[in-house]
Image: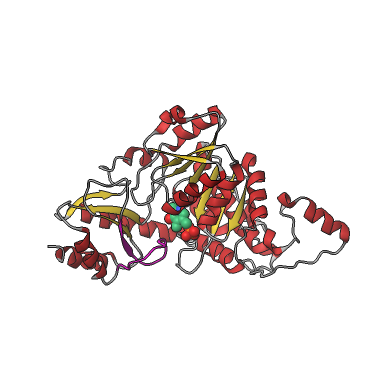
Amino acid sequence: MLGPDRTEVSKNISLDTKLVHVGSRPAEQQGFVNPPLYRGSTALYTTVAEMKESTSNSLRKKIPAYGRFGTPTSRAFEEAMTELEGGFDAISTGSGLAAITTAILAFVESGDHILVTDSVYQPTRNFCESLGRMGIETEYYDPGIGAAIVAKFRPNTRFVFLESPGSNTFEVQDVPAIARACQTAGILTLIDNTWATPLFFRPLLYGVDVVVHSATKYITGHSDSFLGVIVANEKTFGPLRSSAIRMGQSAGADDTYFGLRGLRTLATRLHQHERQALSLAEWLGDRPEVGSVLHPALPEHPGHALWKRDFTGSTGLFGVSLKPKYEMSNVHSMVEGLNLFGLGHGWGGFESLIVPVESHRFLREGPLLRIHVGLENIDDLKADLLQGLNSLS
Ligand SMILES: *Cc1c(COP(=O)(O)O)cnc(C)c1O
């Protein structure tokens, strides 16, 4: 039986079960299974001594404090994410991109060199470009580099930033090989784990130091909120928390509540996204209009072996490239003519989306589309895409 403090659940319990109970303390909230939603800037201290203690060491996240440093609601979400990723502690931020920029700025200074995967989420890349103004050099490496990353290390290399699979082009990285090479060289590793969520990949267990998420996507899961989270190991938590506090990064009360609530159904939703996306990916692979399907769980995907070794599942987001004979302009009309697939950013919600993608990593091949498979009936989704593909010729 679960104790009154449900965060102390046994270590060898499965992730699906943990998702249901992490960060929940019914005994401290009059028996209610969900924590109350705390809205607040000011929190009152009972003594000056308590106030001084609370403000002297912000790393301890002691409550009460000023609301920007956290509330019981954000603490519950952070506790849950820490437990799920197997980390030391976590920091919630107002968006996924804020989690990324806060994590990067925690570790760099003028004169540093950072290595970033060439398949990185474009806004992360835009931010790294802006670091040039502060004297920080970003070098992009091929996501397939693996242990050969060592050849790129310089005395001033601060960290390697990974994302697997890559945004839009879905290359799978050899995360353990890169993490090992970095550990040996004393270089930090940061990874964007938004695609997999901790349910399907847990990078800290493979030696990565810092995991960032856009919880806006699958974790909140309903396209109604912005939320980011940084999960750190013991060595990196201090600098990360200081960075967040210095820059005023914090997450909204409702959003952290939605993050925690989203975790309760994450396994159910992701297993369904996974089944539906695989079914659609296989179906697309057999279509004459399609050149290739970029889905790591398909055996023909170049990253399949690595995915199979390290991940425990796949989610609803994948790519499809059409035959080179099709023009992007035809593809635009096709996408605009679909009924169930929406044209929009911000995947990870309940609904299906499709976007044409222009990637510098995908130049000589046919038009590329990124598909998010939602929770609609799969036959309806196939019928919608079929009329779209038919409209191409
Ligand atoms: C959407 C996304 C982000 C940014 O998250 P926001 O919450 O939109 O700021 C970061 N990384 C990846 C891989 C994403 O897809």
How many numbered tags mark residues here? 0
Residue 113 lies left or right of residue 337; in this view the side is: right
Residue 16 is covered by the magenta coloring: no
For this view, does 203 lie left or right of residue 277?
A: right
Residue 83: tell me if it is visible: no
Say which of 280 and 18 sits in front.
280
* Residue 248 can be seen in this image: yes
**Residue 149 placement (x, y as % from top left):** 44, 31
The correct choice, above or below, for 243 with respect to 47 in the image is: above
Quarter of the image where one finds residue 42: bottom right
Compared to residue 379, the image places residue 277 above or below, namely: above
| Quarter where residue 54 is shown | bottom right
Which secondary structure type mostly characterizes the magenta part of the structure? Answer: loop
Task: Check the image and report above or below for 143 versus 100.
Answer: above
Task: Give x and y (percent) for residue 338.
Answer: 25, 69
Quadrant placement of the N terminus: bottom right
Query: Which image quadrant: the C terminus?
Result: bottom left
Q: Vertically, is 375 above or below 245?
A: below
Which region shows up in magenta? 341-357
